[in-house]
Every structure is written in C-alpha cells, then in structure tokens.
Image (cartoon, rainbow, N blue to C red):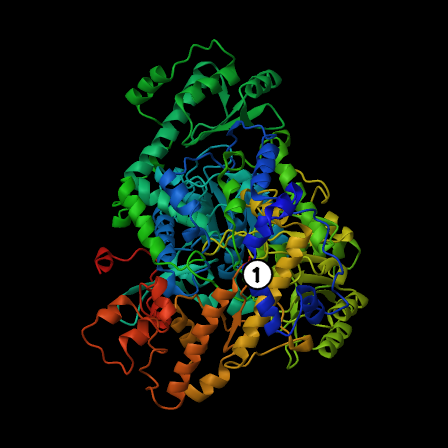
Amino acid sequence: MTAEHVSLKDLENKNEFIRRHIGPGEQETAEMLAELGLGSLEELLDNTIPGSILQAEPPAVGEAHTEAETLVYLKDMLAKNKMYRSFIGMGYHDTLTPTVILRNVFENPGWYTAYTPYQPEIAQGRLEALVNFQQLTMDLTGLDLASASLLDEGTAAGEALGLARRVSKNKNSNLFYIDENCHPQTIDVVKTRAKGFDVDVIVGPATEAVNHDSFGALIAYSDTYGQIRNPQSLIAELQGQKCIVSVVADIMSLILLKSPGSLGADAVLGSAQRFGVPMGYGGPHAAFFATSEKHKRSLPGRVIGVSIDQRGNKGYRLAMQTREQHIRREKATSNICTAQVLLANMASFYAVYHGPEGLKNIASRIHRLTDILAAGLKNKGATLQNDTWFDTITLQVKDKSAMLARADARKVNLRIFDDNRVSISLDECTTRDDIVCLWDIVLGEGHGLNVDTLDSQITAKGSASIPAELVRDDAILTHPVFNSYHSETEMLRYIKRLEDRDLALNHSMIPLGSCTMKLNATTEMLPVTWPELGRMHPFVPVSQSEGTRQMIRELEDYLKIITGFDAVSMQPNSGAQGEYAGLMAIRNYLESIGEGHRNVCLIPASAHGTNPASAAMAGMKVVVTACDENGNVDVADLKQKAEDMKDQLAALMITYPSTHGVYEEGIREICDIIHANGGQVYMDGANMNGQVGVSKPAEIGADVSHWNLHKTLCIPHGGGGPGMGPIGIKQHLVPFVANHSVIKLDGPNPESTAISAAPWGSVSILPIPWAYIRMMGSDGIRKSTAVALMNANYLAKKLAEYYPVLYTGRNGRVAHECIIDIRPLKAASGITEEDIAKRLMDFGFHAPTMSFPVAGTLMIEPTESESKAELDRFIEAMVQIRHEVARVENGELDAENNMLVRAPHTLADILDNEWDRPYTREEAAYPVPSVARSKFWPSVNRVDNVYGDRHLMCSCPPVESYQD
Ligand SMILES: *Cc1c(COP(=O)(O)O)cnc(C)c1O
C-alpha cells in the first residue's frame, strides 16, 4: 500500500494485537490452508465443525481495541476504586513483595508461563522452589510432610475434612466439628464440602468439640478475633475419641508460636498469602497443608519428592502420583489439579530471601506494634475481647458511628461486626504512624499516646500477649537454602539459576493437549501487579471496589456472550473447582424441585480424572459410559444407561470438543437424551479453545459449564497455577450456585455456601482474560479458534505420514488438538511414548500430553499462537525422532542403548570422557542443526520415578547434594 491512498482511519483500524496474538501471518496462513486443501479459515470451520452447532456469526463482544487503549481504559476504570489501608485481617494481609521477587518471578515469563512440572528434567527450577515451599511448611507447622500448595485457606480446610473422613478410625461418626472462631469464609467453604460428602457439621466453641462424637475437627490457632489458646490438651482429648484434629493457622504467627504439629495436630493448614503475595482482592495465593507421615497417602494436592536421575544425581519430581485423580478417578482423595505454584514459589522465595532471622524480625515487629496498639487502647480504658494475640485485637467501641466516620476520613478499613465490636489486624506494612492513626480512629484525636513511650514500657516488662508456654523455642528454617541468599545479588542469581533449569513458553512451544499453552501477552499481564488490584482486601465495603467490580462484570458479560449462558459464577479458582461448583449447583437445584434422590453422574470413559473425582466429592455415583472406536461417546450405550437409570440420573459430564480432540456430531442428541431422562448436562469447558467464537455450550444444550481461563483465555499456567474456573449457568441454576458469607452476591440464594474463600475467586488475574477479549474483539476471537484448528490440522496432516493420528471427525479433521498413537511403534521397536517425550527435550521442546486420554499416545495442541515456523520445527523434530525409532526397529541401534532410551542428554553426558554409545555426541545434543541456534540443556538426566516413590523424601535434600 502506498501512503497517499490510505486514510487515517484505515491506519488506525489495522489492529496489531490480533496479528501479534495469532502466530501464523497472512502468507503462512495461506500456505497452511493450501496444505489442507482449503481456501479460507471460514471454509475450515465449515469443514470441521458440525453444522448443527457452528454459529454463523462471531459473538458480539465488540470491536478489537489496541493494547495501549486497553490499558488506559482499565487504568481509568480502576481509578474508581477507593484505595484504603485495610486492617481487616480474616486471613488477608497487606505485604511487601520483595521487588527482586516481584520483577524476577511474578512478572517474569520464565516463571509464569511454565507448565505443571510433569516433565521433571526440564522443570528442576520450580521443583526446587516448591520443595523449599514444602520445607517451609514443614518447619512452620512442625509436621512431617507438606504438599506443594492448595488453592486457598477455605478449600484447604475442606481438604482437611476430606482427609479426616478417610483416615479417622471413628467410622461410626458422620460429624465434623468446626471451631466457630475460624474465619467465616473458611467455615463457609467447609460447609459446602460437608454437604457434598453428606457429612454433618456442628459449628461451635472449640472447647465443646469434646462433647460431640466426631470423626474430625477443625480448630483455629490464633482465632479470627486474634485470641491464641493452647490447643494441646484439646487435641489430645479429641484424638482420644478417634477424632482427627486439623489446625488452621496464620503463617506469620507460626514464626513466633509453637508449631501446631508439636502440640499434636494431625494436619495444619492456612494461607501463605502474607509471605509476599499481594491480596489481589481475593487472590491468587497459595494455601499450605501439612500432615504426619502416617497420613501421607491421603495428603491432598501435589507433592514434590527427591529422586535420582540416570547418572545417580539428585532429581526432583512429582511424587506419589498414584494418589491423584488422574489415576484414582472417583476413588481419588481430592480433585485438585491446577494449584497455586507461582504463588507458592513467591512465598518460598520470600522465606529464602528473608531467612529465619529476617522473618523473625518481621513477625516480631508486627507483634510488637500490636502490643503497642493494644497497650495504648487499654490505657485509655478500651475493653479488649482478647487477652492474647499475635497481630489481631478485637475490642468494644463506644460510639461506633463516630469511629467509622473517623476511619473513613482517614481511608482506613477495620473489621466491623454487627454489634459494637471491631477488629484490627496489623501486617508488615504497618508503620508507627498507622498506630497513631488507629488510636485517633478508635479514641478520637488528642489521646496523647506515644508509640515510643509504650514501647519502652513493653520492652522493660516484656511482652505477655503470647502465652509463655506457646512461645516458639525450636530452630526453624535451618536448611542452608534459607540462609544463603539474603543479599539482592545472591537472591537474583538464585532465582535466575532456577529459572534457567525450566523450559517455559519464552523458549519454545509447549504443545500440551487439553492444556492450551497459548500466548500470555505482556499487555494482559501488566495490570496483574498494579496496586489498584494487588493491595485491595477482598472484604472491603463494595463501595470501594467499584472499578474492579466493573472489570469483573464486563468479563462476565463477555463470557455470557461467548458461551450463551445466562449468568456466570466467578468463584471457582481452578477448573476442577468449577466442576465441583457446577455439580453442587445441580445437586442443590435437584433438591429444590423434589428430585434430591437423583445422584447418578454419567461420565464417558475418556473423561479427565477431575470429572469423576469432582462427581464423587459432590456425593454423586459415577457411572462410566463407553466410547466407540472413533473416540466418540457411544450414544447407544449412553442412551441405554440414561434410560436404565432415569429415576436416579442427576447429570452427564461431557467435554467438548471431546478429550479425543474431535467435534462429536452427536452432541445435541446426547444433551437431549440426558434432559429427556431428567438429568442436567455439565460441560467440561477445558477445551473451549475449540469453541470460543464459533459455537456456544449453552446453545448446544449444556446447563452448566466451567472454563479454564488459564487455558483458553490466556491466564498463564504459572508452573501449575494459578488458574480460574468460573462456571456459566442457565437461569434455573442461578439461585443454586455459591454465595459468600462475608460479601453477599446478587443472584444466588442468600443461604448458599461458598466454593472458594474469596467471593469472586482470584480477581487479580482477571484482567488477563478481560484484556484478551477486549483486544481481540468479535472477529479476533473467532479467528483465534479458526487458526487453532488450522494449526492442529496442519500438524496432524504433516505428522500422519509418520505417526498414526488416532481419531478424526468429519472430513478427516481434528479439532484444536490431535492424538498420535505410539503403541504400534512401541510394539515394533520397544520405544515408548515416554522415550519420545524425553527425546523431544534434546530438541528443546516440551513433550505433548502423555497417555491422556489414551495410554500409549501423545496429544498435541499447538494453539493459534504458534507460527508456522515453530510448528515446522516441531514437525522436523518428530520426523527425526521417527527416523531414530526406525533405526532401533531395524536393529541398527541397540534396544537399550540408543538416543531415545537415554534421553534427555545433559552437558555432563556430552562432556563425559567415556562415551559408550552407538550414536555420536552430536546426534545426542544437536539432533537437527536448528537446535544449535538456542540449545536448552536439561539440568538432569531422566529422573527415576520408582526410586523416588520407594524412598519418599519431600523435604530439602542435605547440603552435600547441592554441591554437584
Ligand atoms: C485441565 C483440565 C481440567 C482441570 O482443570 P484444572 O484447572 O487443572 O483444575 C479438567 N478437565 C479437562 C478436560 C482439562 O483439560
């Protein structure tokens, strides 16, 4: 185009973001379409998607906006927030994210774009950081074994209920007892879990727990009002009644308090938010969970263990995977899949950076400021409810409305109760001036109190607000990792060293089927760390969060338009949580119409493991339906089962496009069958990348569906979390989705209990999907899906010559992902899908999804963000690997000693003086010339899973093992 014939409008209309998000350019797209025998992307859609579900037009989410404009718009919107200092507590505290962690972890794609560490050889960095998190948890809780993060404190408490139910010897009891002084949202979430399991709950004073015959109890250590009681004798008494006792604790307080483990607790849990992770108006942050050795098989969540690699060196990897929902399905002990890895890593780095002394200083300063605040108030005659505390005091105020007016004038939030009480909770950001300000608020100005004077008095007589018998006296965080990186230079290099061991999207494509590893654009990511989002407490009066709530509403509206649902529940903070939330809504709805006896959940054999696990947690009976040889749901079998069980049928869970990577033609019929037999349709929307902009789940027949915003809608995977799994619902289900005990939501029944701790889930990552949709606009999101299909079909076509593509739909097309079958190769050569996965590392690629949904296969999902050049590099690697397999097959290479079985190759291999292999060093490390361009060296050789589980070790390994 020449300049003189272009208008300003033309220039401005050329949206650059769509082009930047989508990998293939115009020329590449034309070439790839030609390869598929197609003339346009719309033709590809017609050719691939069943006409019965294909939307003629893209959903009306509006025009595409530029990156710059989107940021300005959001900044203006968030300016409507009123930024107060919050002393609300309740499990959320302001924190100082060390800037070296903020910039180099939280804002660093090397950390945030990585995947769950299923391929340990290229994930040793985050695995080490997670082991540090586990060690930190074990040290602070005083227990033997910790997991690598759960979703939030509320759901962690729910998991404690689940653990108690499984391991308690009190099999006659169906009662779980909850200390009424736990945080209200924690109680709320546990109530939901209890309902799912058909467990009875009593919420009452901790001391009265012994008067009830319960299989489990949850006790607050530092309760919601700030009081600290010694739980030791209560725990012992309860355990004497075969009750499993879990303690919910504040992570910062545990630095000064005796560990609950040492006081006898069976499990200890809580939020790790205040270790450097912004409040984010509710999240994301990591919860910690620890238990004793004897309950290790029931520990919820992922656990990182230490094993050895092929050279006998230390290698981390996910341990005890056989407990997970992927394997155990409806017998799984928990449905947790995506957790909070990025945030757990931030918390662990916070501990590494500050070290035991630094943390002690932070905690002691918070505690001392609380002592001073309390002393001043007491001097002036205030009545404190608690006589012990770490950081929180609760008091009676005389003139509540005058006090509230003073607080408002000073832009300060306290926790306000219905009666005349308020609570004040301090944090590491609290200053001396804040204390004076808090006195001014509670007492009115002119109180004459002085911080230093009171401090001298306390210093002289000693603080007594932590009972002497509960003062921590054991050494914590003695491991060298917590004692070595306290200068910024050392810390920066430690973070970088770990980052360099991990392969993330900033190196190469991560073609994990079902996981949708697409671009996490920088513009989408920027707002995540804006203080307007980060420093807002989730329980501020809603009048202060207008800007943020507008963003949430706009995102909800986008999602409704894209999916066709009537309403959205934003609470679930992972896909699996969405499943659970949706099934609980179905259950509540069925009860409301007198159909509460319906409890059968049909699930196709190909379903993701979280589906049956979630169904079991919702109290449903899982009935598996068959798939036919083309990978489709066997409609005849489904129909038969639905009709046979028509009096008990509650729901069907179905993934669309299917986990086999095809658009099933029968989907509408399937939904009709379920409805005709009195059931509800739950659509697992993890594969929404095959639907956004081209078809609508609600219109196809789903009643409820979750979407993994961390897959389809660009939230990065963070190395295994955070995620968001909001659900879309049809009108009849709206009253039955989660509400919240602290912040009441419009729509759901007021008495509905919560799914997550925060009312709208992990809000600070919502600008990502919001910005994505706004910058792509209607046409952009449709194009995105079309290109995702094109990329998958291009790969399938190119690879089909070398590897059989297992399932295809109409016209031989796949959806947004494809499965290649490795079983024939394995039969002929002995080379397994795992060998191929490990060999891909030598080419600098992360393996596709292995053995899901079919054992012995690889599921490849390129997404729309990968360019043709990157796809061609991947194809080149896969073709080269096929040639290598052929050499094993025809006996040219030894079956045990070849570049596939011995993959991945490390620098240590290549530099080894002894080279006893029938292939060259060059073939090992530079299998194709393009690898040399930017070689990624796995930091360990293949990690031995069996050894790791036999010699289970989930703490930081001894120092010597670091000196390699
Ligand atoms: C990823 C996935 C889930 C689980 O989502 P999480 O966010 O990891 O809990 C469920 N179903 C399918 C098909 C998935 O791919």
Crowding near the residue tagged with mark 1, few <14, some 14–19, many ≥20 C-alpha atoms within 10 Å: many
- Quadrant where the C terminus lies? bottom left
Q: Residue at left 52%, top 45%?
A: 523
Q: Residue furthest bottom?
A: 890
On screen, residue 61 above or below 402: below
Q: Quadrant of residue 840 in the image?
A: bottom left
Q: Position of residue 749 (x, y in %)?
A: 72, 44
Q: Residue at left 51%, top 80%?
A: 803
Residue 195 located left or right of residue 598: left
Q: Nearer the viewer, residue 321 or 55?
A: 55
Mark 1 falls on what kind of element?
A: loop
Q: Residue under label 1, please give it.
A: 864
Q: Position of residue 757 (x, y in %)?
A: 56, 44
Q: Nearer the viewer, residue 952 or 795?
A: 795
Q: Report whether residue 606 is seen.
A: no
**Amino acid type of disc 1?**
Glu
Residue 772 located left or right of residue 598: left
The number of numbered badges drawn on the structure is 1
On screen, residue 128 above or below 802: above
Q: Quadrant of residue 464 in the image?
A: top left
Residue 535 located left or right of residue 964: right
Q: Position of residue 259 (x, y in %)?
A: 37, 44
Whether disc 1's CB lies below 8 Å from ligand 1 is answered no
Q: Nearer the viewer, residue 627 or 102?
A: 102
Q: Position of residue 417 (x, y in %)?
A: 59, 28
Q: Report whether residue 435 is seen.
A: yes
Image-quarter location of ligand 1? bottom right
Q: Residue furthest left?
A: 913
On screen, residue 341 above or below 463: below
